[in-house]
Amino acid sequence: MADIDTGGGKKVSTKVDMTPMVDLAFLLVTFFMLTTTFNKPQTMEVNMPDKTEDNKTMKVAESRTTTLVLAENDKVYYYTGTENPEVKLTNFSESGLRKVLRDKVNTVKDPIVIIKAKKESRYKNMVDVIDEMAITGVKIYALVDITPADLELLEKAPY
């Protein structure tokens, strides 16, 4: 505690009452807690089709469909159609996957992209692919499980 010598041999204590300052601090903390808005988590909207009893299928031209297979080490294999597809390799760069998707959007009306992921791919790759769909303007895409036929195609690929 600090003491003040008044010169006559008397010492006067200088006590500072902290109660008003503590009250003000709690009022400010309460005010900011009640008036602050919390950040809402950002989510990606993925619309899934309704589940129906009868699985209706529709014919689509093979030239409209492109299949993307997400693989290990940020690789993306892609091919068009299902009859004797030519598997090609790209990456997530602007001159890679984005260029492939933009070329598809510019050459085909309403392209359909089928996205499949190997077990070795990362979650980040799936998020990046969905972001690329929005960036390039692909309206129709589907997230599908990878099949043994797809894995066989990738094994035969020259990459």
Image (tube, helix red, strand yellow):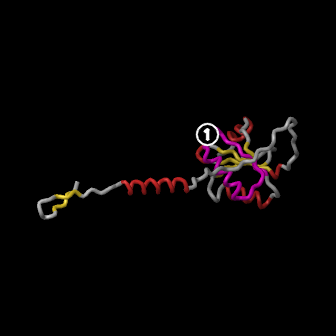
Say which residue appears at 86% left-offset and 35% top-offset: 53
Q: Is residue 136 visible?
A: yes
- Percent across and percent down for residue 82 are 80, 44
- Percent across and percent down for residue 28 are 46, 57
Is label 1 in a helix, a strand or a loop? loop
| Relative to 29, 103 lies left or right | right
- Percent across and percent down for residue 20 are 38, 57
Say which residue appears at 68% left-offset and 47% top-offset: 77
Q: Nearer the viewer, residue 12 or 36?
A: 12
Span highlighted in magenta in the image: 112-141
- Percent across and percent down for residue 59 are 88, 46
Q: Residue furthest bottom?
A: 7
Which of the 4 quarters of the picture holds residue 144?
A: top right
> Residue under circle 1?
120
Q: What is the number of callouts on the image?
A: 1
- Asked if residue 126 lies in the magenta stretch, the reply is yes
Q: Residue furthest left?
A: 9
Which of the 4 quarters of the picture holds residue 152?
A: top right
Q: Is residue 86 visible?
A: no
